[in-house]
Image (cartoon, rainbow, N blue to C red):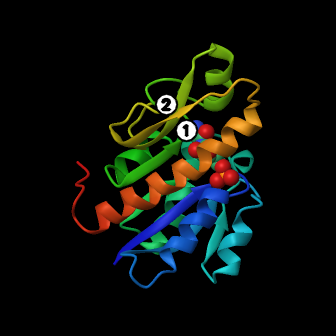
Amino acid sequence: MLNVAVLISGAGSNLRAFLDAAADADYPARVVAVGADRDAEGLAHADQFGIPSFSVPYSAYPTRDAWGEALAVQLRASNPDLIVLSGLMRLLPDGLVAEFAPRIINTHPAYLPEFPGAHGVRDALASGAPQTGASVIQVDGGVDTGPILAQERIAIEPGDTEESLHDRIKPVERRLLIDVVRRIAEGELALS
Ligand code: GAR
C-alpha cells in the first residue's frame, strides 16, 4: 500500500476525487495526510474521510524556506511514500524538493510544457490555441518543468470561458492522477 500525502490550496475537488478512488479496497494507495498553505476549503474533504489534515499558512512565515521547513515537519510526521500537489498554488522551496524528490508529483491544467504556472487555463484560452490539456508531472526545482508522467489533449471550444474550460480539464486531471498513482503503487511507473 502506497502512503500518499496531498497538498492543496483551494476547493480540493481533485483531492476529493482522489479520496473517493483511494477508498476503494482494490486501489493500491491511501491518503495518510492532507495539507494546505492556507485555511483551504478543501481540507474539509480530509475531515469527511477521517484523514489528518494540517495548514501551514505561507503568510505566517518570513521566508519561503522557513515556510518549507514548517511544511516538511508536518509531512515527515505522516511519513508519506509519495506527495501529490493537487492545486497547491505555491512553489516549493529547494530544500523541501531535495528532501522528498523524486517522490513529489503535481497535476497541472495544461499540456506541459505549454502554459506553465499559476494561470494555465487562462493563458491557454488567451493564446487562441485550438487545444490545451492536462498533465501530471514529477516535481523538480522549477515551475512545472519536471518530467511528464501522463498528459492528455483537450479541445478549446468556441465560447469557452476560463471556468467552462477548467471544468472540462479537471475530470481528465483526476483520471490521469488516479492512474499515475496506481501505476507508481504497482511498480509499473518508477520515479527517478
Ligand atoms: C487543478 O486544476 C490543478 O491542476 C490546478 O489547480 C486546480 C485545483 O482545483 N493547479 C495548478 O494550476 C497548479 N499550477 P481543485 O482545488 O478544485 O482540485
C-alpha gap between disc 2 and disc 1: 7 Å
From the viewer's perspective, is residue 46 above or below residue 132?
A: below
Task: Residue type at mark 1: give it.
Answer: Leu
Picture residue at 64% right of the left edge, 71% below the top: 53
Few, some or many residues within 10 Å of mark 2 (<14, 14–19, 20+): few
Q: Is residue 37 visible?
A: no
Q: Are marks 2 and 1 in contact (CB under 8 Å)?
A: yes
The label on residue 16 is none
Name the N-terminal-most of marks 2 and 1: 1
Few, some or many residues within 10 Å of mark 1 (<14, 14–19, 20+): some
Q: Is residue 46 visible?
A: yes
Task: Residue type at mark 2: give it.
Answer: Val
Closer-to-camera residue (26/43):
26
Residue 138, position as x, y percentages in the image: 37, 44
Picture residue at 30% right of the left edge, 61% below the top: 184
**How many numbered callouts?**
2
Drawn side of residue 25 relative to residue 108, left or right: left
Residue 115, position as x, y percentages in the image: 54, 24
The residue under label 2 is 143
The residue under label 1 is 91
Answer with the quarter of the image where residue 91 lies. Answer: top right
